[in-house]
Image (spheres, rainbow, N blue to C red):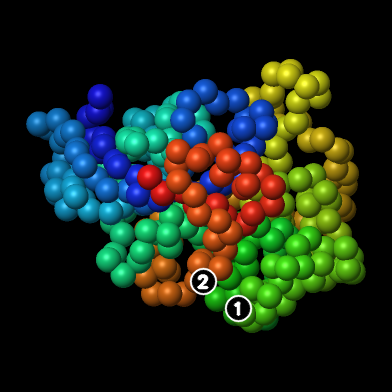
Amino acid sequence: MLRAGEALLRPLCVGISAIDLAICRGGTPFVGTLGHEFVATVEDVFLPPDAPEALSQKAAKLKGRRVVGAMNISCGECDLCKSGLGTHCRHRTVLGVAGHDGCFSDRFTLPVHNLCAVPDSVDDERATFAAPLAAAISAANMIRAEGKCYITVLGDGTLGMLTAQVMARQNSSVRLLGKHPERFGLCDRWGIKHRHISEVGRLQDQDVVVDCTGVPEGLALAMQLVRPRGTIILKAMISPQPTVAGAPSAAPTDLRWSGSVNLAAIVANEIQLLGSRCGPVAAAVSLLEKNLVNVEPLISERAKLHDGLAALKRAASGAIKVLMTI
């Protein structure tokens, strides 16, 4: 049943993310339907008679259209929402992650104001990358590169590959460090320098390090790479691991690292540590429409939703991005 201001969505293509895999491993507690990377068709919208005119106009324009959407669902009434921090709403739910069933289904719902229309020139598969691309844009928007800024991106998964592409569009020297040499050919294609993570020197000479690894070792390495008074952007949450098989996992606000990280360098070298989460979906759609990022090579496999369990296993085995059609 639709709530006021919600749209009923029929997914066309969905992507398996690192968050989905972390939930499956028990790293994040969630009971419900997974999935937050999608492109879908708006089948229906429920608006109350007193809905704002702007919302009514947007709903009318979107009905029957293909859309992508932001995963954070805010209340619109709390102090943070009213101060412009809706993605940090005190009562927020998150599509396929916390309190709201996700897109790995025949139908799902999202508020109309979360949705963004997809241009006809952007096909379903490319549109499915809107959410992770928006996250990459968020990291890039947190820095203002002056002169020739030296940036290192840690991690060669989907988020790392997208972040490197977005960062390279700035006036910056960008390199990507990863563990999968077979993926470095993509960096060559994009004109992005790359090294195996074990081969790089710890010279503390990088202006910005973006950690997309999601493991404690990534942050430890970032502190060895960034210069004094440089910036580390922590892009992927470090997932907690149950200490005993079958034991309950920690809540998302109680992330227990599997290894200790000595944070003394943050103070000693006056490093700025920034957290970065989701980003502007509309800006991601714009980059896709203008062909300013290359996402097709990141698709490792394609599957059907009814083969979802097998697709999740393939994604967990090292694929960059597995897409499922409905």
Name above or below for residue 19 compared with residue 179.
above
Q: Residue, x 69% and y 23% (percent of image)?
A: 249
**Mark 2: secondary structure:** loop
State the image coordinates of residue 170 (x, y, percent, origin top left): 57, 76
Give whichever of 49, 306 is nearer the camera.
306
Q: Quadrant of the C terminus?
A: top left
Give whichever of 147, 203 is nearer the camera.
203
**Residue 228 as seen in the image, left or right of residue 1:** right
**Mark 1: secondary structure:** helix
State the image coordinates of residue 10 (x, y, percent, origin top left): 30, 42
Q: CA distance from mark 1 to mark 2?
A: 8 Å
Query: Which amino acid, by three-letter code, is at mark 2?
Result: Asn
**Residue 152 as seen in the image, left or right of residue 56:** right
Name above or below for residue 171 compared with residue 71.
below
Crowd around label 1: few <14 · some 14–19 · many ≥20 (10 Å): some
Q: Which label sits on residue 190?
A: 1
Q: Residue, x 66% and y 44% (percent of image)?
A: 316
Q: Residue, x 57% and y 63% (percent of image)?
A: 298
Circle count: 2
State the image coordinates of residue 2 (x, y, percent, origin top left): 25, 28
Q: Which label sits on residue 294?
A: 2
